[in-house]
Amino acid sequence: NRDWLGKYVGMSKLALRPKSTEEVSQVLAHCNRRKLAVVPQGGNTGLVGGSVPVHDEIVLSTSRMSQVVSIDALSGVMVCEAGCVLQTLDEQLSQEGLMMPLDLGAKGSCQIGGNVSTNAGGIRFLRYGSLHGSVVGLEVVLADGSVLDVMRTLRKDNTGYDLKQLFIGAEGTLGVVTKAAILCPPRPKACHVSFLACRSFGDVLDVFRRAKSDLGEILSAFEFLDKESLRIYLDKASKAKNPLPDFDGDFYLVIETSGSNSDHDYEKLEAFLGRCIDCGSVATGAVAQDGAQSKDFWRIREGVPEVLASFGAIYKYDLSIPLESMYTLVEEVRTKLKGEAHVVGYGHLGDGNLHLNVVSEQYSDRVLGMIEPYVYEWTSANSGSISAEHGLGQMKQEHIGYSKSPLAVSLMQGIKDAFDPNHILNPYKVLPTCHARGS
């Protein structure tokens, strides 16, 4: 009934935990006949209220559907059930020399069915792209209980409409994903992580330009966090250490390279860092000397959202914004709030994904009114998207118009009506209520 931030709370009195596709089918067939609303739920790590009831909907948990069906080491395709935890899958794949194409801070508890249903991104998006490209097959139970089998393990299948794509990012509003076939890349034999400091966001962008050119095929992650993010992390996290204690930068980067030859990759990284320091884009930095230090660097970036959640109130915005203007929004929101709350910016610079977070001791209608709809209006005016990877859920459903045209929303509603005419699947989410009917 409650999301992990405690922001969204439902009133469901019934949670069902099926263990098979057949049981999911029976549940949905029954609920559809009786027009009972159902909320599919995986690891419940979402940030927009998409996996918790709005009212008293039935919760359908996939947590017991946690079997890996097969791993083909030659093709790299893994077939698994929706309730498999992301980190567990990655650990199993490592035994075959493979890895998951996505990596999230919540990997220890999020489930692959939820990842697929929200089209989760994360830190590996720069290298491996979205799940729209990695998912090669799905098994989905539709609202009436029928089972749609588009479970292929082929990379190429050009026969008719690619129906699986409709369910990737649909947030459980069109069907319940029960199995997925995922193309998994080879696990790199060499990995290097660096933690760098920059004096300005212009310098950050220059480092990114150089990284794409100089590091090329071995660049696997390019993350940034601002000064306020690091300050709060060091203040709140237990045993936190600043990798660059002698320099007070305005921005920090975590850059990862991965490849098949450690000496070759390190030589490229060293040359790249030298050029960045010589031209002044990087003020100072450190390269992890072992796996433990690499984890320490990543712990800072992944730990920022965790420490921010310790505040009494947190307003989170997951946005795609053209790189040149990305940090301008953070600065403008900080000026707009005038010290009434902490404003931090961090995210996946490699794919233009800004995580704008505003934190304070308690929720306030005044603070919310200063943030919304300003953030959405600014993002729309600057050709951005109001949801980069978290989805819309119940947080942003009424704001979809900032990123999609009325015609696009109308067509989405037509798809919803076709797949779920009784609107029992995850109602009050994704599409605005003015378009919903019968739920």
Image (tube, rainbow, N blue to C red):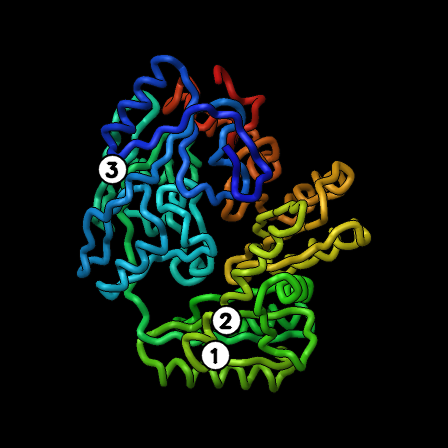
- Nearer the observer: mark 1 or 3; the answer is 1
How many other residues sit within 10 Å of disc 2, few (<14), some (14-19) or many (≥20)?
Answer: some
Instruction: Look at label 2 and name its amino acid.
Output: Asp
Q: Is residue 275 left or right of residue 108?
A: right
Front residue of 14/32: it is 14
Residue most extreme to the top = 34
User: Could you say where residue 120 lies in the image, as x and y percent from the top left?
Assistant: 44, 48
Q: Name the quadrant containing residue 129.
A: bottom left
Q: Name the quadrant containing residue 420.
A: top left
Give me the residue at 35% from left, 81% from top. Answer: 262
Identify the element where label 1 is drawn.
Answer: loop
Instruction: Look at label 3 and name its amino acid.
Output: Val
Identify the element where label 2 is drawn.
Answer: helix
Q: Check contact, mark 2 vs mark 1: CB within 8 A.
A: yes
Q: Is residue 302 left or right of residue 36?
A: right
Q: Check contact, mark 1 vs mark 3: CB within 8 A.
A: no
Whichever of callouts 2 and 1 sits on the residue coming sooner in the sequence is 1
Q: Mark 2 = which residue? A: 296
Instruction: Look at label 1 and name its amino acid.
Output: Ala
Rendered view: 248 above or below 167: below
Q: Mark 3 = which residue? A: 150
Q: Check contact, mark 3 vs mark 2: CB within 8 A.
A: no
Front residue of 142/42: it is 42
Q: Mark 1 = which residue? A: 288
